[in-house]
Image (cartoon, rainbow, N blue to C red):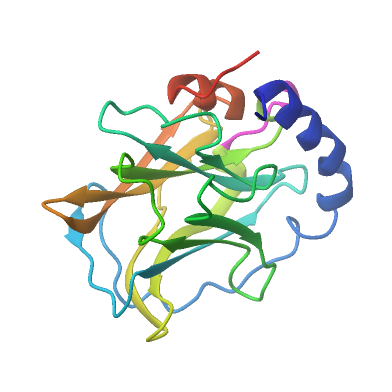
Amino acid sequence: QNTVTDQNRSQSNMSGSVQNSVHVRQITLPNLTKRVLKGQKVALSFSSENIKINFGWNVKNSACDVDVSAFLLSANGKVVGDDYFVFYGQESSPENSVRFRNVEQANVLEVFDIDTRLLNTIVKKIVFVMTINDALENALNFSMLKDAYIQIVDPVANIEVASFLIEEYYNNINSMMMGELYLHNGSWKFNAIGNGVNKDLAGLCEFYGVQVV
């Protein structure tokens, strides 16, 4: 099992190498054609069992090293297990149903590929959270970001199904619950959350039940 101690060590080792390249460069916002509002819940329709989730952002402070993580939750709101936390330090869920990719493209930085056929039936919700690495230690916050978005794509038809663009950037938060996919009567829906919290990745892991040592 990956513990949060190991994950934080990985973050510290990586932050110096990436912060001057990937996370400082400017992306161009994609054409978000099916935007939903904060708090809005919408039904999703796909041409296959596959779902692609794109993320992008720009930073106003080059010290901000940003990443997105996925928490695969059961009905009780906690992760199914410690390995049901997918991010750059643990790039796949146990059954390979959710996979993380760092793509660094012109308008997409990080991607999650989901195969719902492989997804553990205990998983009822997938929450996507954007965090600033070492934010608490370095006094970094979300007012130093802009253009943060989540985009749900049908990868077979290559069309947007839903998207959400963050419009509120407060200086008293360092993590953002971007949105969640959840099962409702056997079908997937999207909830545009957009709620910021004053927790780092370790704090979020503890909140969602990932073992912190």
Q: In the rendering, at what x and y percent does residue 16 appear?
A: 88, 43
**Residue at x 63% of width, y 47% of height:** 67
Q: Is residue 99 above or below residue 175?
A: below
Q: In the rendering, at what x and y percent does residue 49 appear?
A: 34, 70
**Residue at x 31% of width, y 39% of height:** 122
Q: Which residues are magenta?
A: 137-141
Q: Is residue 138 above or below residue 191?
A: above
Extreme residue in the top direction: 213
Looking at the rendered image, the quarter that the C terminus falls into is: top right
**Residue at x 62% of width, y 44% of height:** 144
Based on the picture, tell me whether residue 176 belongs to the magenta stretch: no
Residue 109 quadrant: bottom right
Residue toward you, 79 or 31: 79
Looking at the rendered image, the quarter that the N terminus falls into is: top right
Residue toward you, 103 or 75: 75
Q: Is residue 150 left or right of residue 64?
A: left
